[in-house]
Amino acid sequence: MTRRPDRAQGRACLRRALVWAALCAALVAGAPARAAAQETRADTAAVLLRVAEQLEAEGRTALAAALLQAILERYGETPAAAEAARRRAPGRTAAAGEVTGSGRGELMVWGTLYGLWLGAAVPAAAGTDEPEAYGLGLLLGGPAGFLAARFYAGEGLTEGQARAITFGGTWGTWQGFGWREVADVGRTPEATFTAMIAGGLTGLGIGAALAHNRPITPGTATMVNFGALWGSWYGLAAAIAADLEGDDQRITSTLIGGNLGLIATALAAPGWNLSRQRARLINVAGVAGLVSGFGVLLLLQPEDDNTAILVPTLTSAVGLLAGAAWTRNYDRRSRPAGAGGSGGGEALLERRGGRWAAGEPRPVPVLLEAAAGRRVPGLRLDLVSARF
């Protein structure tokens, strides 16, 4: 006969469930880290600024404006952002919008950022602590990523194709990190960085192969992005409900769930024919349901893990279904050009120009400070971005 857990044990189970939910958010959705490497961010922004200056000198003002905008949005606290704001002339805004709204421009901006990540990750994978190695990697990585993306994109890359490629690289980086943890192949930061690099490049190649000569709408790309993230959450929830106690088992379930979610939405989303903005609104409703579920947990304080994980799992599913129902006529009311959506960026919720908009958050690889001055790999997801 099993013994019913007392109140203290119930609270401990609840805390454990909440901790694992936070782990899912940190690993899968890349929750913001408390100790981001500020010096690395400043160096990254400085390299981007130099690339933008070179583009301006070559007369490519539209691409330069796109990189300046990326610096302002991603590295607003750095000295390079202040210089980017000064150099960004008002007359270039329209041209920048044309570039960032195209697949070619988006791929080049992402390629530059990914090149900077590789520039720092490769020396870390080699186990070097020499600052010169990281400096050289940053100096070469950004321009190399920009040129590689520019060469690949050509002139006919659509926005949906570009997002399939960039998400493949980001998702592959997370998969490399997760499966290395599960397989326990090396327990050093060098092994982790190596796995993330290999996974990212593999995902990048798969994304490029899938996007090659295939029509992918921005709405489909957005749904696949969110489908992978929701699949990861439900995979973790299933592991907790099944009483899988080991970290490796729960990470495995999270990884498998994310891949199943990605595959399922990749097969189904083209038939849905959603705009990007409607896809964002549906997923914002799902996140609202998820957060409300955790609020209910704090009020009820259930005594077992199954109840603790069941509540946010159900409320997030209800939120997604409600969002799909509430927005069923959204695309009909939108203008024809709205098939790709507009107004949102890379945070889940953004406030710009006095208006709130739903965005499309994507995990971004970052370097975090660890003990003894070492840096370890991590993921970041911007949930709220506001400008007043």
Image (cartoon, rainbow, N blue to C red):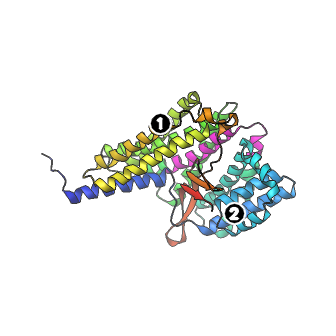
Quarter of the figure with the C terminus: bottom right
Task: Tell me, yes or no, whether the two marked residues, 2 and 1, touch with CB atoms within 8 Å.
Answer: no
Q: Which residue is labeled 2 in the image?
A: 45
* 252 in relation to 339, above or below: below
Residue 270: image quadrant is top right
In x, y percent, where is residue 202?
Answer: 60, 43
Q: What secondary structure is marked by label 2?
A: helix
Disc 1 is placed on an element classified as helix
**Start and end of the magenta stretch?**
149-177
> Residue, x 75% and y 63% (percent of image)?
84
Main secondary-structure element of the magenta-colored stretch: helix
Residue 2 drawn in magenta: no
**Residue sitting farthest toward the top:** 271
Amino acid type, mark 2: Ala
Return the residue at label 1.
260
Percent of width and height locating residue 205: 64, 40
Residue 290 is left or right of residue 357, and the answer is left
> Is-magenta flag for residue 158?
yes
As rendered, which of 228 and 177 lies closer to the eye?
A: 228
Can you see residue 340?
yes
Q: Position of residue 150 (x, y in %)?
A: 76, 46
Please rate how many residues cluster around mark 1, counting C-alpha atoms within 10 Å: few if below 14, some from 14 to 19, many from 20. Answer: some
